[in-house]
Structures are given as C-alpha cells and as structure tokens.
Image (spheres, rainbow, N blue to C red):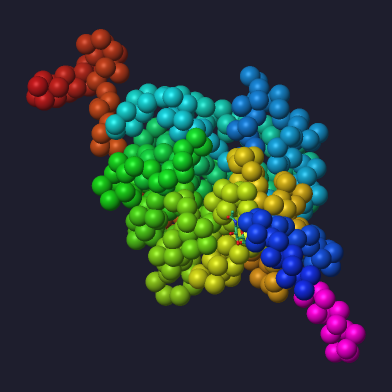
Amino acid sequence: MSPAQSYTGMLLGILFLVSSVWAVSAGQAEYHVPDPRHLSKAKDLLQQFQLIDTHVDTPQVFRVMSRQPHDMIETMATGFPGHFDIPRAREGGVGGVFFTVWSPCQDQIGVDVGPDFLNPDDTVRDVLEQFDLINGIVEQNNQTFSLATTAEEMEHAFSEGKIGVMMGMEGSHMLGNSLATMRVYASLGVRYLTLTHVCHSAFASSAGGGAGTDGSALKPVHAGNGLTDFGRALVLELNRLGVMVDLSHVTPQTMHDVLDITRSPVLFSHSATRALYDHPRNIPDSVLERIGSKPGQNLGVIHSILTDLFMGPGNATIDTVVDHVEYIAHKCGKAHVGLGSDFDGMPSTVKGIDGDEDWPKLIAEFVRRGWTDDEIHGLVSGNLRRVMRENEQVKRTLVADLPSRAIYEKRTDLPAPNWGGPSGAYLPPKVRELVFHRRHDEL
Ligand SMILES: *[C@@H]1O[C@H](CO)[C@@H](O)[C@H](O)[C@H]1NC(C)=O
Ligand SMILES: *[C@@H]1O[C@H](CO)[C@@H](O)[C@H](O)[C@H]1NC(C)=O
C-alpha cells in the first residue's frame, strides 16, 4: 500500500468511525445502499434461479377493501397500494409465491369461540371464498400466474417465464375442528398449514403476539402449551396428505411436539430467531438445534420474514434480515434456509425493503457476504423445493393408509340422529329401528 493509499484508508477509517458513532448515538441502524456490482449480480441470479416467497397475504386484503373482493383482482396488473403486484414482482425477479389462505382468529373480530373452540362461526365459508378469490387472481392473470401443487409444477411455471402460485393456509382455527375439512383444503391446493395464527386452536398452542396486543406470549390453554392429542393426529394426517407442517407462529413446545412425531421435513414459512431478537414468536436455539442434515435432525427449512416487528421495531434493516438468516444457517446449515416476506400482512417493513421490487437488494447482501451461486440457489428456492419433494415422497409412501378417523373429542354433534328427520321420518325402517333402538339403549 502506498503512503497516499494508506492516508486515504485512514481518512476513510475515521469517517467510518465517525459515522458509526453517529449511528449508535442515534440508536438507529441505517440501511446501506448495495454496491451496484452486487445488485447486478443479484438480478442475474434471479433470472437463473426461481425465487419463491413462502408468505404473501395480498388476497385477504382484497376483502378488507371491497364488498366485491373480485373487483380488486385487476389491481394485480395495474398496481396495488401494498407490497405485492405483478409489475413489482416482475421487477423484483420473483418466480413463485405462496398466497396465504386466511381468515382472522375469531377473537380478533370480536367472536368468542368458547372454551372448547366449539361456538359456530363463519370461518369455513370465508376461507372457501378466499380459495375462490385466489383462483380468480390466477385465472384472470394466466399470462403471468400458474397454479402449482408440486415442486415440479412450480419449477415448470418458472421455466415458462411465469410466476408459480401455491397456497399456504395460516392457522388451524380455520379447520372447523375437523380433519375432513383439512383433507378438502388439501384437495383445493393447500400445500402448507401453519399450525396456528395468533390464537390457540383445538390442535395447537400459539405464541400469540397478534395485532393490538403488547406482543407478549399468549396465556396457555392446553396442558404443556404445545400440541394436543388431536393436534398430533393432524400432523400425521398432514404428512399423509403431503401438506407441509409450518411452525411459524406456534409456541416452542408446539415446535418440539411436532418435531417429535412428524414423518416429513417441516417448514417455517416466515420466522426470525430469538437469539438475535427476543420475541415470543421467534425460534429459540433449542428448536434450531433440531433442524439440519445431521442424523436425528429434521431436514426442514426456515424462511425469513421482512417485517421489523420481530427483529427490532423501527430499527431492523436488510442487513438484520440477513443476520437472522445467517444465524440460522450457522446453526442448521445453509441447506436449511429460505425466503419469506409476509408482504401485505404487516404494517412495516425492514429498512431497504418497500415491496416485491426490492428482493434483489436483499440478495445483493448475500452476494456481498460471499454466498456462492449454489448457496443462493438453495436460499431462493432450492432448499424449499427439496423439502416439498420430500413431503411429496412421504405422501407416496403412505398412499395405502386410510384417512385418519380422528374426531375432535369435545364435539357433541356426532352421531347426528336428528339428521334422520322428526322421529326418523327420512330413514329406511331398518335404519330407523337401529338408530332409535341404540338411542333407547343409551338413555
Ligand atoms: C438498532 O440496531 C443497532 C445495530 O444493530 C443497535 O446497536 C441498536 O441498539 C438498535 N437500536 C434500537 C433502538 O433497538
Ligand atoms: C387464459 O385465459 C383465457 C381466457 O379465459 C383462455 O382463453 C386461455 O386459454 C388461458 N390461457 C392459459 C395458458 O391457460
């Protein structure tokens, strides 16, 4: 190094020190604009490799904005005032998305589900309307979107220059306490189920932290604050159906209970880590230690989240997101990380990200930190597609198993003798005799 160079280096060093002192005194991390070389490399990689975002909430927002949510579909092409639409997804090099199938936890809209989750509500209707809406989004933009149900179909969509669309369902509170409902949802295209949203269900315990709460952990209602017995039956049924079990939003105990029994690799569709930011919704080290490629570990994959709320409200940047991903990669291996956003389901994003157009800036930071092309391929979709294929493979090995007969033990509506009409008027005589004979015995 020449004296002039070292002098310049020293000056830069002092400037750097001064600016970092300023940043610390202000208490705010700032986002650094990427080097143009890293950005252009990132854009090139996203032409070659499909980026699949595992959590996009846009379809449910249509329902907030219009009495006829289908009227909102055209905003996908013309521009949507949130985070996701087609022009921005194209600009950001997005090759695949999981649209979230969701309706709110009932307590969030003032409906009491009751102590056993049995009070009637409109959730199943509302969710079926959301399937219809997602189908409409895909069909009315069929030059751009292609509905996929397997890893291979997802890849095929990308090879045709389209954005592959899959469906993920966020919360078992939408199942009407029924495995049969889950089977139908799977037949409609659902390929992951987040075991809870921000409320507990008959199946599993949630970490809580929903909108309007102080973000502290939810008060437990189930013994152990993890999976229930019925929840265990659900996990095994999801394995049989080839639907990935998503562990974002659940309590650490629910995570552990699932890892104890699942036959397939798990997914965390949008999560951060507790070691770097202590929030009840984030993943603790004790769980990270169980994910990876070593013997006895679950081969699952953990995807990022792009809201600042779980990584430092008002303070998290693109760098913070990459810190969380690298922390997970350090614990679990680079073959076990991926990308999720939570676009259109969050009030604020990390600094540097305004919407789908900004994915290349995030990828540029991985380039800057020395991730190889192969590792970035794994990060943007390769690792997820592996987990999807492994879930599909488990489904094939279980094809001879019958659907689970498990029924929620608190249900009181079955058997349903009244379905036979007044005094069994609709029933063939021998059936009527059996039904009423049995009822008589039970009395
Ligand atoms: C913001 O992040 C920086 C860098 O990570 C950290 O030093 C600072 O304490 C954070 N400030 C707040 C208010 O959390
Ligand atoms: C797209 O939709 C139009 C109108 O319904 C239909 O004619 C066309 O075949 C569809 N294209 C694809 C690729 O599905």
Percent across and percent down for residue 429 are 22, 16
x then y, percent, for residue 324: 57, 62
Quadrant (top left, top right, bottom left, bottom right) of the C terminus: top left
The correct choice, above or below, for 243 with respect to 263 in the image is above
User: Residue 298: x percent and y percent?
Assistant: 44, 65
Residues in magenta?
1-13
Residue 12: say if magenta: yes
Q: Is residue 309 visible?
A: yes
Query: Which of these two is toward me, 135 or 397?
Result: 135
Count up the numbered dots: 0
Residue 386 in view (yes/no): no
Q: Is residue 281 left or right of residue 367?
A: left
Specify the quadrant that holds the N terminus.
Answer: bottom right
Q: Residue at x 63, y 53 (%)?
A: 315
Principal SS element in the magenta part? helix
- Residue at x-position 44% and y-position 51%: 280
Residue drawn at x 77%, y 49% as measured from the top left = 357
Work out whether 287 lies above or below 61: below
Task: Report if residue 34 lies within the magenta region.
Answer: no
Which residue lies at the image location 60% right of the left edge and 33% below the top edge? 60
Side of 252 where 89 appears, left or right = right
Q: Indicate the position of residue 347 as horizontal and vertical percent values.
A: 62, 40
In the visual, does 415 lie left or right of 244? left
Q: Nearer the viewer, residue 111 or 424?
A: 111
